[in-house]
Image (cartoon, rainbow, N blue to C red):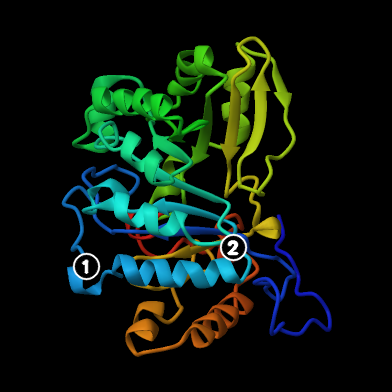
């Protein structure tokens, strides 16, 4: 696999959309609203947890709204709230209402582990949230408890029901698959959600290359082969917005299943995503953490023009892609831990 090459004789634009030197326009922003999480998922953080950022280092809702507004003025049209776990941050409904009111923002969604979502789904929908992705790696209660170290499967299933009732559709189930851990759940999840095919999608995700993830890596092709033993897979066109998942429909149930495969079928050449972390750092690539903090820029009194100029500079410096799909000396694991980044 290869990475994109810079466009020849291409200079950083001073206006228009957020474009990098590879010609990729960025229209999708993931916003981490907290580094805290009420789970301790085995692939996401150590069992003992992490040292959380002091609250003074978190961007306030006003700061987040202002910075997201700058992204939208520069062409971002889709925003997804992440964490940590976004529902553990107090008064999340207020932030959703502020972001939903930004002119030019077409789509506001959220990724959640679902533990606290059932009671928030309705208020969040009324505040302007459009859709939710809910993490669910297994339907086995004991395995679920082991993978999350603290989670209650019943709460997550109730959250899915509440999200459907609130109209936060399609609900996308995010399932991280690991070899010799939960690979048997590929077919089980497809069967469980088949009857909800008109309102639910299931996305199977390769483990991200943090720490020892390579040891349990399960390629997307193998997951599709598991499903093909029971279903007829029909390829679907890529959904509007250019997300990372590649979709198939299971002919027998109508369920759309997606595969997010950053290692075996990486999508760096078409990447249109940026990540705003809760401390104000922007990850222009999921694998990197080397940009200055927009939080500090805002708190230093920067005006909107200065914030927009900083964003253009960061995006222009974006790397061609991660190297975790490469072999030998070229391999480079992702920096940090997943919960502090927000996916």
* Label 2 with label 1: CB-CB less than 8 Å: no
Q: Closest to the observer: 231 or 195? A: 195
| Disc 2 packing (10 Å; few <14; some 14–19; many ≥20) | many
Residue 105's label in the rendered image is none
Q: Residue at x 40, y 35 (%)?
A: 134
Is 121 left or right of 313, judged from the image as shown? left
Q: Position of residue 70 (x, y in %)?
A: 52, 73
Q: Position of residue 79 (x, y in %)?
A: 50, 55
Secondary structure beneath disc 1?
A: loop
Q: Which residue is mark 2?
A: 76
Residue 53's label in the rendered image is 1
Q: CA distance from mark 2 to mark 1?
A: 27 Å
Quadrant location of the N terminus?
bottom right
Q: Is residue 211 visible?
A: no
Between label 2 and label 1, give the one nearer the viewer. 2
Is 258 left or right of 139, judged from the image as shown? right
């Amino acid at each position: 696999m290869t990475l994109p090459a810079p466009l020849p004789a291409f200079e950083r634009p001073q206006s228009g959309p957020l474009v990098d030197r590879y010609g990729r326009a960025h229209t999708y922003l993931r916003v981490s609203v907290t580094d805290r999480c009420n789970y301790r998922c085995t692939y996401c953080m150590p069992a003992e947890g992490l040292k959380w950022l002091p609250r003074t280092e978190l961007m306030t809702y006003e700061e987040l709204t202002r910075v997201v507004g700058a992204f939208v003025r520069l062409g971002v049209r889709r925003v997804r709230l992440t964490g940590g776990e976004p529902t553990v941050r107090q008064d999340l409904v207020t932030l959703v209402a502020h972001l939903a009111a930004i002119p030019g923002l077409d789509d506001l969604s959220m990724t959640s582990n679902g533990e606290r979502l059932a009671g928030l789904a309705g208020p969040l929908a009324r505040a302007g949230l459009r859709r939710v992705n809910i993490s669910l790696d297994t339907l086995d209660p004991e395995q679920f408890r082991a993978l999350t170290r603290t989670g209650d499967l019943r709460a997550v299933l109730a959250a899915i029901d509440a999200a459907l009732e609130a109209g936060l559709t399609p609900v996308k189930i995010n399932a991280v698959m690991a070899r010799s851990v939960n690979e048997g759940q590929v077919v089980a999840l497809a069967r469980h959600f088949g009857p909800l095919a008109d309102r639910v999608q299931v996305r199977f995700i390769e483990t991200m290359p943090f720490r020892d993830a390579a040891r349990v890596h399960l390629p997307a092709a193998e997951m599709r082969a598991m499903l093909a033993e029971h279903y007829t897979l029909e390829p679907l066109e890529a959904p509007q917005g250019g997300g990372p998942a590649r979709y198939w429909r299971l002919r027998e149930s109508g369920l759309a299943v997606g595969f997010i495969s950053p290692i075996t079928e990486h999508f760096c050449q078409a990447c249109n995503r940026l990540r705003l972390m809760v401390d104000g750092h922007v990850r222009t690539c999921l694998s990197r953490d080397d940009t200055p903090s927009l939080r500090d820029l805002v708190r230093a009194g920067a005006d909107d023009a200065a914030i927009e100029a900083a964003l253009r500079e960061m995006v222009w410096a974006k790397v061609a892609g991660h190297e975790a799909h490469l072999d030998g000396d070229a391999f480079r694991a992702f920096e940090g831990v997943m919960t502090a980044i927000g996916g």
